[in-house]
Structures are given as structure tokens and as C-alpha cells.
């Protein structure tokens, strides 16, 4: 008996984690030194922080969406003044939910010291049931306490926390504009300065857009610094953008040092192709004996109809196999593209042949590195972008 082994080749599971405040109590408080009062007072009304963990399976075996109920070994750490401490179950200052739909939820029952934020670090584990791979999930959320005797500027961006980019139909560029307000009024332009930063996943640091150490071919900051344009077609699989603001009531924002208490907003962009269908046409039922090739054409569509330029993100792969009376067929790759020319040499005189079509995502455009972490460049030092 002849045996052949086959294995499943699953694509990596994408795990995302974000944090939200559950309820009306914010994760930022103020302290009035005159009255010795916190607003809100977490010892009276706790702040509730909910980590939201989700998955996306490109093989579409596992359903996408929230997976908090499947997390194990859920725990939190408290970081104050650089000291990291595990929050035990008997810690009266916190209450942690370790299982169920809200696994990871933490109630904060203590107040932060003024200008010394409490950093809460979340930890959880998730097992990919397709491969039994263990995923470690981590993220941080901070509790700030501001001086209520002075207004704290609030930074906002005109973009969602997470933007899903569909390269088949969405515009390539998106401009994000920053706003810094004191109460309901926009801060005077001479008293505020925006700093845009891009997350470097290799070095695990934020790098200022425009700095020499930043690969920022996919982001451009406006001359006045108020907006940043993201070219999503060049960002790769995802991009994380942070905007921080310097504010000085005396009109010298450039002298202000950025820190954990600085107004800050982080947003992300994620490339995601929606589900699509495909088929091919143009192959005659009966092929004349002297016909040397056939010229089929592929069609690709989704819920909105035919894709106008599918070749930009998708690649059609054509296969052919000599047909036979019984047994499995052996397919060989013979062409690529939407309108190929396929030779008929593989046809059996009796049983003919079978043509197969597959369509794959060719992936995002991005800079690539060699094994030493050096980015590929041309002879003039320009970064090479590779599909």
C-alpha cells in the first residue's frame, strides 16, 4: 500500500486587544487639593476597565470576533513608579473577572496620585484550537489623576480608534486631523504643538514621523502639524499612529517635554480583504484537434458586484491536469493573470483535461528587511517597497 502524507497549512491567527471603559466612570480623574477631593472617587465608585480580545482567522475556520470567554490564566499587574506588582485575588483595591464573556474585566477601587499614573498591565492566554498554539495576550491601560485647579487640554482625532481598510474599494489615502480643546474651545495655535508618531513593531518603540530613524514613506505630516495623511496602500498589514500634544499657556509649547500625562490619542489602520467569489469562462466544450491553446478569462466579484481592478490585490493562478478514467488528478501551474493562454498539450486524446483556477491575495505593499534587519534600498538609498 502506498501512502502519502498531507498536512494542514493554517495561516497565522491574528489576535487584537483593545481596552474600553465599561460604564459612566472614566479612567481619568482629577484631584482638588483645596478640598482634598477626587472626581470621580474610585474608592466610592470604581472605574471598570474591559479588555476586548478578538481574533481573525484568514482561513475562515474560526469565527471572527470577541474571544474573552476562551481566555485562560487571566491576570493584571500594577505598575507605579516603574515597580511592577502582580494584583492578587485578595487585593482590596481591585476586583478581577477571570472567566466568562467579560474575562479580564478589572474594577479599580483606588485613586491615583496626582501626576503619577497607575499603569495596569493585562495578561491572558488563548489556545488556537486549529494548531494548539498558545497565544500570549498583553496590553496596558493607564489611570491618570490631573490637577483640577487648571484645565487639562483634551486631544481628539477625526478618525476611528480602528479603521478597516479594504484595498479593493476604499480610497488609498486618509487624512487624520488633530484637535486640542480647553473645555469647549479650541486651543490657540500659538500655545499648542502636535507631535505625530508611528509604531515600530521591530524595535517596539514609537518613532516621530519625519525623524531619520522612521520609515515613514506611508505617512506625511502637514506643514502646520495639524494633520497627518496615511497612504494605506503602502502601510503593509497594519499601521499604528499616535498623536501627542504639547501645550503651554504662555505660548511656548516647544519647550514642553512630552510624558505619560501629555494629551495623547492612538489609532490604528488594518488592511482586510472581504470575502470574494471567482469563476472562469471562455473554454469551449469541444476542442478541435488542431487547437494548440485555449484562452479562458477569470471573473472575480463580491457582494457589490464585479471587482473593477482585481489584479491590484489578487492573483489568478491557472492549473491543468490530464484527465483520466479514474483516480486522482495531478495539477500543474501553467499560467497567471486574468486572461491567460493555456496550451492544450496536457489533454488526453480520450479523456481530455481539467482546468483549475485559484485566486490568492498577493499581500500588502511594504518595506522588507534581510535577516540582519537591514531594509532593502536601491542604489540611491530609496526604500524598496515589495508586494
Image (tube, rainbow, N blue to C red):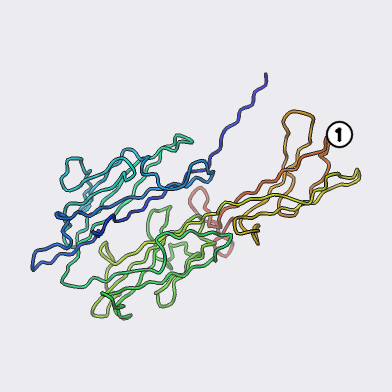
Name the residue at the left extreme: 35
State the image coordinates of residue 276 (x, y, percent, origin top left): 60, 52
Residue at the image point whose x is 52% and y is 46% from the top: 58
Residue at the disc numbered 1:
350
* Quarter of the view holding residue 125: top left
* Quarter of the view holding residue 4: top right
Other-residue count near label 1 (Cα within 10 Å), few / some / many at <14 / 14–19 / ≥20: few
Comparing 276 with 164, the one in front is 276
Left or right of 221 on screen, residue 364: right
The secondary structure type at the circle numbered 1 is: loop
State the image coordinates of residue 61 (x, y, percent, origin top left): 52, 41
Residue at the image point whose x is 51% and y is 47% from the top: 371
**Relative to 51, residue 377 above or below:** below
State the image coordinates of residue 302 (x, y, percent, origin top left): 61, 55
Which quadrant: the N terminus?
top right
**Relative to 304, residue 2 above or below:** above
* Quarter of the view holding residue 73: top left
Left or right of 202 on screen, residue 110: left
Residue at the image point whose x is 56% and y is 38% from the top: 9
Name the residue at the right extreme: 290
Residue at the image point whose x is 83% and y is 41% from the top: 345
Comparing 180 with 38, the one in front is 38
Left or right of 368 on screen, residue 98: left
Amino acid at each position: 500500500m502506498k501512502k502519502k502524507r498531507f498536512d494542514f497549512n493554517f495561516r497565522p491567527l491574528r489576535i487584537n486587544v483593545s481596552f474600553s471603559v465599561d460604564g459612566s466612570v472614566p479612567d481619568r480623574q482629577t484631584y482638588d487639593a483645596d478640598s482634598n477631593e477626587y472626581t470621580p472617587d474610585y474608592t466610592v465608585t470604581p472605574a471598570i476597565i474591559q479588555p476586548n480580545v478578538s481574533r481573525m482567522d484568514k482561513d475562515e475556520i474560526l469565527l471572527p470576533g470577541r474571544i474573552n470567554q476562551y481566555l485562560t490564566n487571566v491576570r493584571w499587574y500594577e505598575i507605579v513608579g516603574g515597580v511592577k506588582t502582580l494584583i492578587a485575588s485578595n487585593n482590596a483595591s481591585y476586583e478581577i473577572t477571570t472567566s466568562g464573556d467579560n474575562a479580564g474585566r478589572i474594577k479599580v477601587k483606588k485613586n491615583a496620585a496626582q501626576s503619577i499614573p497607575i499603569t495596569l498591565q493585562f495578561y491572558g492566554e488563548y489556545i488556537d484550537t486549529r494548531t494548539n498554539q498558545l497565544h500570549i495576550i498583553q496590553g496596558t491601560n493607564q489611570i491618570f489623576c490631573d490637577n483640577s485647579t487648571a484645565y487639562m487640554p483634551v486631544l481628539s482625532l477625526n478618525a476611528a480608534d480602528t479603521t478597516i481598510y479594504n484595498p479593493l474599494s476604499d480610497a488609498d489615502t486618509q487624512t487624520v486631523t488633530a484637535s486640542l480643546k480647553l473645555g469647549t474651545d479650541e486651543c490657540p495655535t500659538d500655545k499648542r504643538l502636535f507631535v505625530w508618531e508611528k509604531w515600530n513593531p521591530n524595535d517596539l518603540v514609537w518613532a516621530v514621523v519625519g525623524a531619520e530613524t522612521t520609515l515613514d514613506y506611508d505617512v506625511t505630516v502637514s506643514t502646520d502639524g495639524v494633520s497627518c495623511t496615511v497612504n494605506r496602500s503602502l502601510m503593509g498589514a497594519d499601521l499604528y499612529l499616535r498623536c501627542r500634544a504639547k501645550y503651554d499657556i504662555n505660548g511656548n509649547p516647544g519647550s514642553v517635554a512630552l510624558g505619560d500625562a501629555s494629551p495623547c490619542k492612538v489609532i490604528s489602520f488594518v488592511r482586510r480583504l472581504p470575502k470574494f467569489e471567482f469563476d472562469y469562462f471562455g473554454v469551449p466544450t469541444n476542442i478541435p484537434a488542431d487547437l494548440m491553446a485555449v484562452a479562458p478569462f477569470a471573473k472575480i466579484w463580491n457582494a457589490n458586484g464585479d471587482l473593477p481592478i482585481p489584479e491590484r490585490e489578487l492573483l489568478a493562478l491557472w492549473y491543468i491536469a490530464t484527465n483520466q478514467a479514474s483516480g486522482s488528478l495531478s495539477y500543474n501551474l501553467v499560467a497567471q493573470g486574468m486572461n491567460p493562454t493555456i496550451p492544450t498539450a496536457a489533454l488526453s486524446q480520450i479523456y481530455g483535461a481539467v482546468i483549475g483556477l485559484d485566486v490568492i491575495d498577493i499581500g500588502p505593499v511594504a518595506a522588507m528587511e534581510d535577516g540582519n534587519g537591514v531594509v532593502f534600498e536601491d542604489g540611491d538609498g530609496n526604500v524598496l517597497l515589495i508586494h
